[in-house]
Image (spheres, helix red, strand yellow):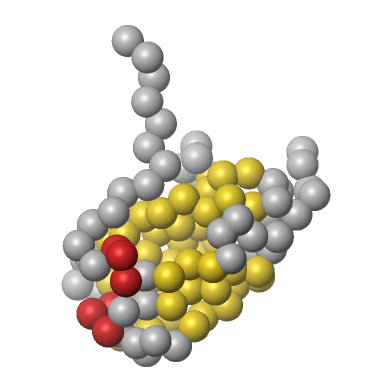
Amino acid sequence: MEPCILIGVAESGAEAISVYPNPTTGALSLRLPASMTGVVSVQLAELNGRVVLTERINAVAGVPYRFNLNVNDGTYVLHVRTAAGSETMMPVLVSVGQSE
């Protein structure tokens, strides 16, 4: 059996989340839908699960939030969780010229 790597899961409402630019060179913007207002947890993790960024934001619908990523080139998973427990995951590609 071939190994399988999960790089993204789209749940209800995920199509309304906007992450840009993707791929990024280090600055990432996130815009959330009206259904994700209030306190939201944002995490960026390597594919092995190691979390490299954790932010809690007070989300306002349609307002972009900017994150400056200080990470190596690679593929990461962005986790967006609401206080109600709803979670959305999506892949983020980073290419800043900082390979290990």
Q: Residue 4, how many percent across, how many down? A: 37, 25
Which quarter of the figure is the N terminus placed in?
A: top left
Residue appearing at x 69%, y 46% in the figure: 73
Q: Is residue 43 above or below residue 77?
A: below
Quarter location, residue 69: bottom right
Q: Residue furthest top?
A: 1
Q: Residue furthest right?
A: 97
Q: Is residue 81 visible?
A: no
Which quarter of the figure is the C terminus placed in?
A: top right
Quarter location, residue 63: bottom left
Q: Is residue 15 above or below residue 2?
A: below
Residue appearing at x 53%, y 48% in the figure: 76
Residue 9 vs residue 12: left or right? right
Residue 65 vs residue 35: left or right? right
Q: Is residue 81 above or below residue 1?
A: below
Residue appearing at x 70%, y 60% in the figure: 25
Q: Residue 92, how many percent across, how many down? A: 52, 54
